[in-house]
Amino acid sequence: MITAVILAAGESKRMGLSKPLLKIGDKTFVRNIVDIYKRSLVEDVIVVSQPGEGDIEKELGGTGVSIVPNPEYRKGQLSSIITGINVAEKSHADAVFIHPVDHPDINESVINKLVERYRRDMALIVVPKY
């Protein structure tokens, strides 16, 4: 199983606004990313958020994604990566996409090519190049 871990637990200090809830077109960053992964070959999506982040839960209600709180989000992005990977491992993920929420402009075909490349080569790391 291939899982996407979306990192949405940051404090957005420099931005001053919640990055996951910023808009790209008519969707929020986090919803846009989730929707693209849900249409891709990725089988599971985990969103790592701050504890008690009701706005993200409300935004993603009905999407079937797992929203996982990172109680140590103040320690930085690595703590969210660890939180997401731990949950993915318990769900028996074979591979994980790590996706920061502040990169909402993604392409489903690129995701699918990465999945296909992983499945073909079973590489430890697959990185897109442009």
Image: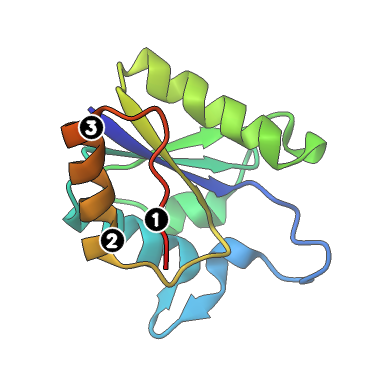
Residue 42 visible in the shown view: no
Between the C-alphas of marks 1 and 2, the distance is: 8 Å
Identify the element where label 2 is drawn. Answer: helix
Q: Nearer the viewer, mark 1 or mark 2?
A: 1
> Mark 1, residues whose alpha carbon is within 10 Å: few (<14), some, or many (≥20)?
few
Amino acid at pointer 3: Asp
Counting from the top left corner in percent of width and height, residue 54 is at: 55, 50
Identify the element where label 3 is drawn. Answer: helix
Amino acid at pointer 1: Pro
Between the C-alphas of marks 2 and 3, the distance is: 16 Å
Label total for image: 3
Give the residue number, with chain letter if any, for mark 2.
Answer: 110
> Taking 122 as reference, is 57 above or below it?
below
Amino acid at pointer 2: Val
Give the residue number, with chain letter if any, for mark 1.
Answer: 128
Q: Nearer the viewer, mark 2 or mark 3?
A: 3
Query: In which quadrant of the rendered image does the C terminus lie?
Result: bottom left
> Is residue 47 left or right of 119 when viewed as pictured?
right
Query: In which quadrant of the rendered image does the N terminus lie?
Result: top left
